[in-house]
Amino acid sequence: MASITVISRIGLKFLQLPQSGFLAPCLQNVIIQQQQQVRHRRTKHFEPKWKRLRKEKYVKVDIPNLNERAEDLSQEQIKTRMKERGILPPRPWLERPFHISCTGGVFEGYVPPEGDGKLSAVSKEGAKQKFEQLEKKTKSMMAIRKIRSFDDDFEPPEFAAQAQDIYVQAHSLLIEKNKYKLREIVTERAYPELMHNVHDKTINWKFIKSLEAPRVVHARCTDVISKDNIFGQVTVRFHTQQILAIYDRFGRLMHGSEIVEKDCLEYVVFEKHLSNEYGVWRLHEKIIPEWSPPKAPAYITYRVDDEPPAPKQEETKEVTATNEEGDKVVTATA
């Protein structure tokens, strides 16, 4: 086996391994460690001109006293500690952010003309209604122009068809009791009114057809809190045929029928947050005219027992009286 030559020069050791042959693993590790340069404290390079820069590498940190309790400090000491640490004092009131996604009602609500849906345009009353609607159309046209400044593609005839789809979808989700999808097409104001008293009820609803094409009859815009925060409301007139039947939790019919088709004339308000770039039209409220007939009350059901109730027994009461001679007389009456 060839010999190993060891050369020592300035603290470095170079080991020349033989061209052929092998060493034990332990000897190989020792040789590799000896080939690496070792840097000691005495061999560290020192230059006085970099002393200031080396000093700035170290930052003095004021370590707080962790054993110090706030109960043991005075108000002035607490203020001093907070100023030293850059802590702002707590506010005495509680502020919570809020988001206005819809209005609280209908502003300048539409007043339906009496006899709408029954009077024809040929009759005297029907022609008078058409003339009054033309007079009230000015504000609606100005509101539609305001809506178009935010939504360039807004057209009343196209929106009326879109509103009917939203109306049908909202009632379908109400039947399914899909609360999450219903919140997307219904405003926060209309949601509790739709879901009121729906628990433990079975609702069967079906949209048959439109007797008249839906149309936009009213439009308004308003600002909330600031002039830039604008909401738009559009009232759409629906004249449709529907089927509605409501059953209670025991399967008893409460309202309507699954066979009889009813003609429904409704004025539904749709709202959109125009200032919101991602705002959508949602169902907001339904206008019920004063001249509309009252709704039929729900059928009231009673429990009928198989056995008739037992007859009541006649109770007897004892009455005491005195005669002319002063003697007590006991009499029994039913």
Image: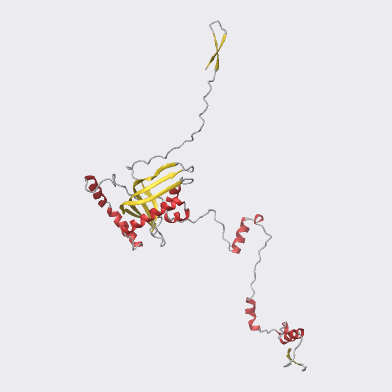
Pick the front one: 246 or 222: 246
Which residue is drawn at the image coordinates 25% and 52% (left, top)? Answer: 134
Query: Is 103 on the left-hand or right-hand side of 314?
Result: left
- Is residue 189 visible to the viewer in this orientation of the structure? no
In the image, residue 194 sits, relative to residue 273, either above or below, namely: above
Pick the front one: 175 or 279: 175
- Is residue 241 visible to the viewer in this orientation of the structure? yes
Residue 18 x %, y %? 74, 92
Visual colour scheme = secondary structure
Q: Which of the image's four quarters has the N terminus?
A: bottom right
Q: Give the total of numbered labels.
A: 0
Residue 102 x %, y %? 42, 54
In the image, residue 251 sits, relative to residue 164, either above or below, namely: above
Which residue is drawn at the image coordinates 43% and 45% (left, top)? Answer: 246
Query: Is 326 on the left-hand or right-hand side of 35?
Result: left
Residue 274 x %, y %? 38, 59
Pick the front one: 235 or 252: 252
Quarter of the image where one finds residue 19: bottom right
Query: Is 70 on the left-hand or right-hand side of 130?
Result: right
Quarter of the image where one finds residue 159: bottom left
In the image, residue 11 sits, relative to residue 236, either above or below, namely: below
Residue 122 x %, y %? 21, 48
Pick the front one: 59 or 146: 146
Q: Residue furthest front?
A: 306
In the image, residue 203 sits, relative to residue 148, either above or below, namely: above
